[in-house]
Image (cartoon, grey):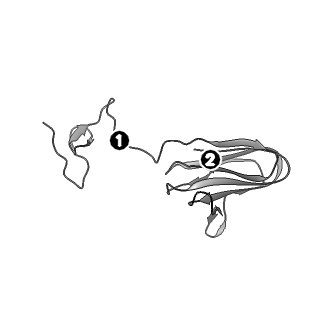
Amino acid sequence: MPIPIISPSGYAATRAVAFADADGNAVLASGSLPLPVTLGSDPTVPLAGTTAASGTFGPYQPALGREAMLTLSGSWTGTIRVLRSTDGGVTRLPLTIAGAAWAQFTANCCEPIWEETEALARLYLEVTLSSGSLTYRLAQ
């Protein structure tokens, strides 16, 4: 007989870990029925490419609660900025921290640049090249 879980807990202490099923009953976690835990949304499709021309590339949809990694490589000169939008790309603002420019690059890199918390947010790469060819990848 199922044991109802009373709100607000959402879980029941047993000899094993349990969680509430769709009907609010305790279900023991197992290999075939693991805990229903997620870390944001599923990993997203990377924004990747190579360009020898300036432009804005995106959008990239970051997974919530996970760091977005930016990789820039190639022989190029110029500036790359990461922009963020929450209105479908109509308004794109550069990332900042304490009011100072953040995620702005003039050389190759491979580093985490942002951890998103808002589901509607999208990231873009603003590429301003003076010369050369840039290969970019923005991914989780």
| Within-10-Å neighbours for mark 1: few <14, some 14–19, many 20+ | few
- Foreground disc of the pair 1, 2: 1
Q: Residue 81, how many percent across, how many down?
A: 71, 57
What residue type is disc 2 on? Met
What residue type is disc 1 on? Pro
Quadrant location of the N terminus in the rendered image: top left
- Residue located at (62% from left, 54% from top): 123
Q: Residue 65, how many percent across, how many down?
A: 49, 51
What residue is disc 2 on? 69
Quadrant location of the C terminus in the rendered image: top right
Q: Residue 33, how many percent across, how many down?
A: 31, 33
What residue is disc 1 on? 36
* Displayed quadrant of residue 29: top left
Q: Residue 138, how many percent across, how many down?
A: 64, 46
- Residue located at (82% from left, 46% from top): 52
Q: Secondary structure at mark 1?
A: loop
| Within-10-Å neighbours for mark 2: few <14, some 14–19, many 20+ | some
Would residue 31 be found to the left or right of residue 5 on screen? right
Q: Earlier in the sequence, mark 1 or mark 2?
A: 1
Q: Residue furthest bottom?
A: 99
Q: Secondary structure at mark 2?
A: strand
